Image (spheres, coloured by chain):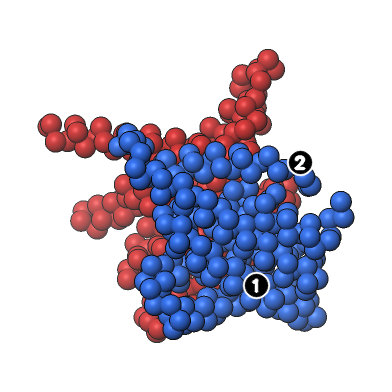
Chain colours: A blue, B red
Protein backbone atom coordinates (compact mmCIF):
# COMPACT_ATOMS: atom_id res chain seq x y z
CA UNK A 1 0.00 0.00 0.00
CA UNK A 2 1.17 3.52 -0.68
CA UNK A 3 2.30 4.78 2.73
CA UNK A 4 1.89 8.42 1.74
CA UNK A 5 -1.77 8.24 0.76
CA UNK A 6 -4.12 10.20 2.99
CA UNK A 7 -6.32 7.23 3.81
CA UNK A 8 -3.37 5.22 4.94
CA UNK A 9 -2.04 8.01 7.14
CA UNK A 10 -5.42 8.32 8.81
CA UNK A 11 -5.80 4.59 9.42
CA UNK A 12 -2.25 4.18 10.59
CA UNK A 13 -2.36 7.01 13.12
CA UNK A 14 -5.87 6.09 14.28
CA UNK A 15 -5.75 2.32 14.63
CA UNK A 16 -2.53 0.60 13.64
CA UNK A 17 -0.23 2.92 15.57
CA UNK A 18 -2.83 4.12 18.03
CA UNK A 19 -1.26 6.99 19.95
CA UNK A 20 -2.39 5.81 23.35
CA UNK A 21 -2.04 2.06 23.07
CA UNK A 22 0.98 1.70 20.81
CA UNK A 23 3.02 4.87 21.41
CA UNK A 24 1.99 5.51 25.03
CA UNK A 25 1.18 9.14 24.45
CA UNK A 26 -1.40 10.97 26.50
CA UNK A 27 -1.38 8.32 29.20
CA UNK A 28 -1.94 10.80 32.05
CA UNK A 29 -5.34 11.89 30.81
CA UNK A 30 -6.05 8.37 29.59
CA UNK A 31 -5.79 7.14 33.18
CA UNK A 32 -7.33 10.21 34.75
CA UNK A 33 -10.40 11.07 32.69
CA UNK A 34 -11.49 7.67 31.41
CA UNK A 35 -14.13 7.09 34.06
CA UNK A 36 -17.26 8.17 32.22
CA UNK A 37 -17.81 7.53 28.53
CA UNK A 38 -19.50 10.89 28.05
CA UNK A 39 -16.65 12.97 29.47
CA UNK A 40 -14.11 10.83 27.64
CA UNK A 41 -15.77 11.52 24.32
CA UNK A 42 -15.80 15.27 24.89
CA UNK A 43 -12.22 15.41 26.09
CA UNK A 44 -11.33 13.47 22.98
CA UNK A 45 -13.07 16.07 20.83
CA UNK A 46 -11.23 18.90 22.61
CA UNK A 47 -7.89 17.16 22.19
CA UNK A 48 -8.57 16.48 18.52
CA UNK A 49 -9.36 20.14 17.97
CA UNK A 50 -6.16 21.28 19.68
CA UNK A 51 -4.23 18.72 17.65
CA UNK A 52 -5.61 20.09 14.39
CA UNK A 53 -4.86 23.70 15.30
CA UNK A 54 -1.38 22.97 16.56
CA UNK A 55 -0.59 20.68 13.65
CA UNK A 56 -1.41 23.45 11.16
CA UNK A 57 0.57 26.01 13.14
CA UNK A 58 3.48 23.65 13.63
CA UNK A 59 3.67 23.17 9.89
CA UNK A 60 3.87 26.93 9.34
CA UNK A 61 6.41 27.39 12.13
CA UNK A 62 8.63 24.65 10.82
CA UNK A 63 8.60 26.24 7.38
CA UNK A 64 9.60 29.62 8.78
CA UNK A 65 12.29 28.17 11.06
CA UNK A 66 13.87 26.23 8.21
CA UNK A 67 13.94 29.44 6.14
CA UNK A 68 15.65 31.20 9.04
CA UNK A 69 18.04 28.29 9.75
CA UNK A 70 16.87 28.24 13.35
CA UNK A 71 15.70 24.65 13.76
CA UNK A 72 16.89 24.59 17.36
CA UNK A 73 13.98 26.87 18.26
CA UNK A 74 11.53 24.23 17.06
CA UNK A 75 10.65 22.70 20.42
CA UNK A 76 10.19 26.03 22.18
CA UNK A 77 7.95 27.49 19.51
CA UNK A 78 5.84 24.32 19.21
CA UNK A 79 5.16 24.37 22.92
CA UNK A 80 4.23 28.05 22.83
CA UNK A 81 1.74 27.43 20.01
CA UNK A 82 0.18 24.46 21.77
CA UNK A 83 -0.18 26.37 25.02
CA UNK A 84 -2.01 29.18 23.22
CA UNK A 85 -4.24 26.75 21.33
CA UNK A 86 -5.21 25.17 24.63
CA UNK A 87 -6.00 28.56 26.06
CA UNK A 88 -8.31 29.15 23.09
CA UNK A 89 -10.11 25.85 23.60
CA UNK A 90 -10.44 26.54 27.29
CA UNK A 91 -12.18 29.86 26.60
CA UNK A 92 -14.47 28.25 24.00
CA UNK A 93 -15.47 25.38 26.27
CA UNK A 94 -16.08 27.69 29.21
CA UNK A 95 -18.36 29.83 27.09
CA UNK A 96 -20.36 27.14 25.30
CA UNK A 97 -20.47 24.25 27.74
CA UNK A 98 -19.89 25.14 31.41
CA UNK A 99 -20.87 21.63 32.51
CA UNK A 100 -18.13 20.09 30.40
CA UNK A 101 -15.76 22.73 31.75
CA UNK A 102 -16.45 21.53 35.29
CA UNK A 103 -16.29 17.85 34.36
CA UNK A 104 -12.87 18.15 32.75
CA UNK A 105 -11.54 20.23 35.63
CA UNK A 106 -7.76 20.25 35.87
CA UNK A 107 -7.37 18.14 32.75
CA UNK A 108 -8.35 20.97 30.45
CA UNK A 109 -5.31 23.17 31.10
CA UNK A 110 -3.26 19.97 31.27
CA UNK A 111 -4.02 19.34 27.59
CA UNK A 112 -1.07 21.63 26.92
CA UNK A 113 1.19 19.13 28.66
CA UNK A 114 -0.52 16.25 26.90
CA UNK A 115 2.34 14.54 25.14
CA UNK A 116 0.10 13.33 22.33
CA UNK A 117 -0.28 16.85 20.98
CA UNK A 118 3.40 17.74 21.01
CA UNK A 119 4.09 14.32 19.50
CA UNK A 120 1.79 15.05 16.56
CA UNK A 121 3.75 18.22 15.86
CA UNK A 122 7.10 16.44 16.19
CA UNK A 123 6.21 13.33 14.20
CA UNK A 124 4.77 15.26 11.29
CA UNK A 125 7.95 17.32 11.10
CA UNK A 126 10.15 14.23 11.31
CA UNK A 127 8.22 12.45 8.59
CA UNK A 128 8.15 15.55 6.39
CA UNK A 129 4.41 15.49 5.73
CA UNK A 130 2.91 18.27 3.62
CA UNK A 131 0.16 20.42 5.07
CA UNK A 132 -2.74 18.21 4.01
CA UNK A 133 -1.02 15.04 5.17
CA UNK A 134 -0.18 16.69 8.48
CA UNK A 135 -3.79 17.69 9.09
CA UNK A 136 -5.04 14.19 8.24
CA UNK A 137 -2.40 12.75 10.54
CA UNK A 138 -3.55 15.01 13.37
CA UNK A 139 -7.19 14.08 12.74
CA UNK A 140 -6.34 10.38 12.80
CA UNK A 141 -4.31 10.72 15.97
CA UNK A 142 -7.16 12.59 17.64
CA UNK A 143 -9.70 10.00 16.51
CA UNK A 144 -7.49 7.21 17.80
CA UNK A 145 -7.08 8.97 21.13
CA UNK A 146 -10.83 9.44 21.45
CA UNK A 147 -11.40 5.81 20.49
CA UNK A 148 -9.02 4.47 23.13
CA UNK A 149 -10.38 6.81 25.80
CA UNK A 150 -14.00 5.89 25.09
CA UNK A 151 -13.39 2.13 25.04
CA UNK A 152 -11.52 2.41 28.32
CA UNK A 153 -14.27 4.50 29.89
CA UNK A 154 -16.90 1.96 28.84
CA UNK A 155 -14.92 -0.86 30.42
CA UNK A 156 -14.33 1.06 33.61
CA UNK A 157 -17.99 1.95 33.96
CA UNK A 158 -18.81 -1.74 33.96
CA UNK A 159 -16.02 -2.53 36.39
CA UNK A 160 -17.68 -0.30 38.99
CA UNK A 161 -20.07 -3.18 39.65
CA UNK A 162 -17.47 -5.93 39.69
CA UNK A 163 -16.10 -7.40 42.88
CA UNK A 164 -12.34 -6.92 42.78
CA UNK A 165 -9.63 -7.27 45.43
CA UNK A 166 -9.02 -4.00 47.23
CA UNK A 167 -5.28 -3.89 46.58
CA UNK A 168 -5.48 -4.03 42.81
CA UNK A 169 -8.31 -1.52 42.56
CA UNK A 170 -7.50 1.78 40.85
CA UNK A 171 -4.55 2.42 38.62
CA UNK A 172 -3.01 -1.04 38.77
CA UNK A 173 -6.19 -2.57 37.39
CA UNK A 174 -6.61 0.16 34.79
CA UNK A 175 -3.10 -0.49 33.55
CA UNK A 176 -3.75 -4.22 33.25
CA UNK A 177 -6.89 -3.54 31.21
CA UNK A 178 -4.95 -1.11 29.05
CA UNK A 179 -2.42 -3.87 28.44
CA UNK A 180 -5.11 -6.22 27.20
CA UNK A 181 -6.61 -3.47 25.04
CA UNK A 182 -3.20 -2.74 23.59
CA UNK A 183 -2.82 -6.43 22.79
CA UNK A 184 -6.11 -6.32 20.93
CA UNK A 185 -4.92 -3.35 18.92
CA UNK A 186 -1.71 -5.20 18.09
CA UNK A 187 -3.86 -7.39 15.88
CA UNK A 188 -3.97 -4.53 13.39
CA UNK A 189 -0.20 -4.30 13.21
CA UNK A 190 0.08 -6.53 10.16
CA UNK A 191 -1.97 -4.11 8.08
CA UNK A 192 0.99 -1.84 7.38
CA UNK A 193 4.33 -0.73 8.82
CA UNK B 1 21.82 19.67 62.21
CA UNK B 2 18.33 20.87 61.40
CA UNK B 3 19.41 22.09 58.01
CA UNK B 4 21.02 18.81 57.05
CA UNK B 5 18.03 16.75 58.10
CA UNK B 6 15.72 19.02 56.13
CA UNK B 7 17.89 18.62 53.06
CA UNK B 8 18.04 14.88 53.58
CA UNK B 9 14.27 14.48 53.88
CA UNK B 10 13.73 16.71 50.86
CA UNK B 11 16.08 14.54 48.87
CA UNK B 12 14.82 11.19 50.14
CA UNK B 13 11.09 11.89 49.84
CA UNK B 14 11.38 11.92 46.06
CA UNK B 15 12.92 8.47 46.06
CA UNK B 16 10.16 6.47 47.72
CA UNK B 17 7.53 8.28 49.76
CA UNK B 18 6.76 10.73 46.97
CA UNK B 19 8.13 8.69 44.10
CA UNK B 20 6.78 10.48 41.04
CA UNK B 21 5.93 7.30 39.15
CA UNK B 22 4.75 4.84 41.79
CA UNK B 23 2.93 7.26 44.08
CA UNK B 24 1.87 10.27 42.02
CA UNK B 25 1.53 8.45 38.68
CA UNK B 26 3.28 11.30 36.89
CA UNK B 27 5.40 10.94 33.80
CA UNK B 28 3.62 7.80 32.67
CA UNK B 29 4.36 8.24 28.99
CA UNK B 30 8.15 7.80 29.05
CA UNK B 31 7.76 5.23 31.83
CA UNK B 32 5.87 3.00 29.45
CA UNK B 33 7.34 3.97 26.13
CA UNK B 34 11.11 3.78 26.43
CA UNK B 35 11.52 1.08 29.07
CA UNK B 36 11.92 -1.87 26.73
CA UNK B 37 15.61 -2.15 27.61
CA UNK B 38 17.85 -1.25 30.54
CA UNK B 39 20.09 1.12 28.60
CA UNK B 40 17.14 3.02 27.12
CA UNK B 41 15.44 3.48 30.46
CA UNK B 42 18.64 4.56 32.22
CA UNK B 43 19.50 7.15 29.60
CA UNK B 44 15.94 8.46 29.60
CA UNK B 45 15.98 8.66 33.41
CA UNK B 46 19.28 10.50 33.50
CA UNK B 47 18.27 12.93 30.74
CA UNK B 48 15.07 13.73 32.61
CA UNK B 49 16.99 14.16 35.86
CA UNK B 50 19.35 16.60 34.16
CA UNK B 51 16.47 18.69 32.82
CA UNK B 52 14.64 18.48 36.14
CA UNK B 53 17.59 19.63 38.25
CA UNK B 54 18.72 22.44 35.98
CA UNK B 55 15.26 23.85 35.30
CA UNK B 56 14.29 23.60 38.99
CA UNK B 57 17.39 25.53 40.02
CA UNK B 58 16.89 28.20 37.36
CA UNK B 59 13.21 28.60 38.20
CA UNK B 60 14.05 28.87 41.87
CA UNK B 61 16.64 31.55 41.06
CA UNK B 62 14.10 33.53 39.03
CA UNK B 63 11.12 32.91 41.30
CA UNK B 64 10.93 36.49 42.53
CA UNK B 65 11.29 37.95 39.05
CA UNK B 66 8.57 35.97 37.26
CA UNK B 67 5.11 37.53 37.63
CA UNK B 68 2.63 34.92 38.85
CA UNK B 69 0.20 35.43 35.92
CA UNK B 70 2.67 34.21 33.32
CA UNK B 71 4.57 31.73 35.47
CA UNK B 72 3.35 28.56 33.71
CA UNK B 73 4.34 29.92 30.31
CA UNK B 74 7.75 31.01 31.61
CA UNK B 75 8.32 27.63 33.29
CA UNK B 76 7.55 25.85 30.04
CA UNK B 77 9.98 28.08 28.14
CA UNK B 78 12.75 27.37 30.67
CA UNK B 79 12.07 23.64 30.56
CA UNK B 80 11.97 23.61 26.75
CA UNK B 81 15.35 25.34 26.65
CA UNK B 82 16.98 22.70 28.83
CA UNK B 83 15.34 19.89 26.88
CA UNK B 84 16.81 21.30 23.69
CA UNK B 85 20.22 21.31 25.42
CA UNK B 86 19.75 17.70 26.56
CA UNK B 87 18.63 16.73 23.07
CA UNK B 88 21.84 18.07 21.51
CA UNK B 89 24.04 16.60 24.26
CA UNK B 90 22.61 13.10 23.75
CA UNK B 91 23.01 13.48 20.01
CA UNK B 92 26.67 14.36 20.58
CA UNK B 93 27.38 11.54 23.03
CA UNK B 94 25.67 8.61 21.36
CA UNK B 95 23.77 8.71 18.12
CA UNK B 96 22.55 5.17 18.87
CA UNK B 97 20.72 6.13 22.05
CA UNK B 98 19.43 9.22 20.29
CA UNK B 99 17.88 7.07 17.58
CA UNK B 100 16.31 4.54 19.93
CA UNK B 101 14.76 7.20 22.16
CA UNK B 102 13.55 9.15 19.14
CA UNK B 103 10.94 11.80 19.73
CA UNK B 104 10.75 10.92 23.41
CA UNK B 105 13.71 13.15 24.23
CA UNK B 106 11.83 16.16 22.93
CA UNK B 107 8.78 14.92 24.80
CA UNK B 108 10.59 15.40 28.14
CA UNK B 109 9.15 18.92 27.87
CA UNK B 110 5.67 17.66 28.56
CA UNK B 111 6.75 15.32 31.35
CA UNK B 112 4.40 16.30 34.17
CA UNK B 113 7.03 15.55 36.83
CA UNK B 114 9.14 18.55 35.82
CA UNK B 115 6.21 20.95 35.72
CA UNK B 116 4.93 19.50 38.98
CA UNK B 117 8.21 20.03 40.84
CA UNK B 118 8.58 23.53 39.37
CA UNK B 119 5.10 24.55 40.39
CA UNK B 120 4.92 22.91 43.81
CA UNK B 121 8.50 23.22 45.04
CA UNK B 122 10.97 25.27 43.03
CA UNK B 123 8.76 28.35 42.79
CA UNK B 124 8.60 28.55 46.58
CA UNK B 125 12.01 27.42 47.83
CA UNK B 126 15.68 28.36 47.62
CA UNK B 127 18.14 27.13 45.03
CA UNK B 128 19.86 24.53 47.20
CA UNK B 129 16.66 22.87 48.39
CA UNK B 130 15.04 23.00 44.95
CA UNK B 131 18.07 21.34 43.42
CA UNK B 132 18.00 18.58 46.02
CA UNK B 133 14.27 18.08 45.65
CA UNK B 134 14.64 17.85 41.88
CA UNK B 135 17.55 15.44 42.22
CA UNK B 136 15.51 13.22 44.54
CA UNK B 137 12.51 13.15 42.22
CA UNK B 138 14.74 12.64 39.21
CA UNK B 139 16.51 9.70 40.80
CA UNK B 140 13.17 8.29 41.95
CA UNK B 141 11.99 8.51 38.36
CA UNK B 142 15.19 6.88 37.12
CA UNK B 143 14.75 4.11 39.71
CA UNK B 144 11.23 3.42 38.51
CA UNK B 145 12.34 3.40 34.87
CA UNK B 146 15.21 1.10 35.75
CA UNK B 147 12.87 -1.40 37.46
CA UNK B 148 10.57 -1.38 34.45
CA UNK B 149 13.43 -1.67 31.98
CA UNK B 150 15.16 -4.45 33.89
CA UNK B 151 12.00 -6.57 34.23
CA UNK B 152 10.96 -6.07 30.62
CA UNK B 153 14.38 -6.74 29.15
CA UNK B 154 15.14 -9.80 31.28
CA UNK B 155 11.77 -11.44 30.63
CA UNK B 156 11.15 -10.14 27.14
CA UNK B 157 14.59 -10.55 25.67
CA UNK B 158 16.46 -12.81 28.09
CA UNK B 159 19.20 -10.23 28.52
CA UNK B 160 20.22 -7.60 31.08
CA UNK B 161 21.81 -4.51 29.52
CA UNK B 162 22.74 -6.66 26.54
CA UNK B 163 24.25 -9.54 28.59
CA UNK B 164 22.45 -12.86 28.29
CA UNK B 165 20.91 -13.99 31.59
CA UNK B 166 19.17 -17.27 30.97
CA UNK B 167 21.42 -18.69 28.28
CA UNK B 168 20.59 -19.53 24.68
CA UNK B 169 17.85 -22.07 25.44
CA UNK B 170 15.57 -19.39 26.87
CA UNK B 171 12.51 -18.64 24.80
CA UNK B 172 11.85 -14.88 25.31
CA UNK B 173 8.36 -13.60 26.07
CA UNK B 174 8.27 -11.14 23.22
CA UNK B 175 5.04 -9.63 24.55
CA UNK B 176 7.02 -8.01 27.38
CA UNK B 177 8.97 -5.68 25.10
CA UNK B 178 5.88 -4.89 23.05
CA UNK B 179 3.63 -2.02 24.16
CA UNK B 180 1.13 -4.15 26.05
CA UNK B 181 3.92 -5.63 28.16
CA UNK B 182 4.67 -2.14 29.42
CA UNK B 183 1.15 -1.77 30.75
CA UNK B 184 1.28 -5.19 32.41
CA UNK B 185 4.64 -4.62 34.11
CA UNK B 186 3.69 -1.17 35.38
CA UNK B 187 0.37 -2.53 36.67
CA UNK B 188 2.16 -5.34 38.47
CA UNK B 189 4.76 -2.97 39.94
CA UNK B 190 2.03 -0.66 41.26
CA UNK B 191 0.39 -3.68 42.84
CA UNK B 192 3.67 -4.64 44.54
CA UNK B 193 4.15 -1.08 45.81
CA UNK B 194 0.58 -1.13 47.17
CA UNK B 195 1.22 -4.41 48.98
CA UNK B 196 4.50 -3.17 50.50
CA UNK B 197 2.94 0.07 51.70
CA UNK B 198 0.02 -1.85 53.21
CA UNK B 199 2.41 -4.19 55.10
CA UNK B 200 4.41 -1.26 56.42
CA UNK B 201 1.25 0.45 57.61
CA UNK B 202 0.10 -2.70 59.40
CA UNK B 203 3.46 -3.12 61.11
CA UNK B 204 3.42 0.52 62.23
CA UNK B 205 -0.05 0.25 63.77
CA UNK B 206 0.91 -2.97 65.59
CA UNK B 207 4.11 -1.52 67.04
Identity of the residue drawn at 66% across and 41% down: A186
Q: Position of residue B109 (x, y in %)?
A: 55, 64
- Say which of A127 and B80 sits in front: A127
Q: Is residue B71 visible?
A: no
Identity of the residue drawn at 43% across and 37% down: B189
- Are dots 1 and 2 on a single chain? yes
On screen, residue A124 versus residue B44, left or right, reads right
Q: Which mark is residue A190?
A: 2
- Say which of B177 and A183 sits in front: A183
Q: Outermost residue toward the right?
A: A2
Instruction: Categorize mark 2 by other alpha carbons within 10 Å: few (<14), some (14-19), many (20+).
Output: few
Tell me the SS state at disc 1. Answer: helix
Q: Chain of mark 2?
A: A
Res A168 quadrant in image: top left
Identity of the residue drawn at 65% across and 30% down: B174
Q: Which residue is mark 1?
A: A52
- Say which of A167 and B177 sits in front: A167
- Say which of A135 and B85 sits in front: A135
Disc 1 and disc 2: Cα gap in Å?
A: 28 Å
Q: Is residue B133 visible?
A: yes
Amino acid sequence: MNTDSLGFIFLSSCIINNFVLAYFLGICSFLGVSKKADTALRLGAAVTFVMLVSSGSAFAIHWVLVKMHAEYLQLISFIAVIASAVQLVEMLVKKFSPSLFRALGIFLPLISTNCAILAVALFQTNREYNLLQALVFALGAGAGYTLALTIMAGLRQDLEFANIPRLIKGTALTLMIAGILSMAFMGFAGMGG
Amino acid sequence: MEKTSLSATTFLSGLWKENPVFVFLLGMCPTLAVTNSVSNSLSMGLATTFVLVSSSMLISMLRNLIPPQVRIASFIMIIATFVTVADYIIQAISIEIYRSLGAFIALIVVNCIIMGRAESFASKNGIWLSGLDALGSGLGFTLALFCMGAIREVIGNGTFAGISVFGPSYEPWVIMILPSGGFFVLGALLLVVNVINERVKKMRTKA
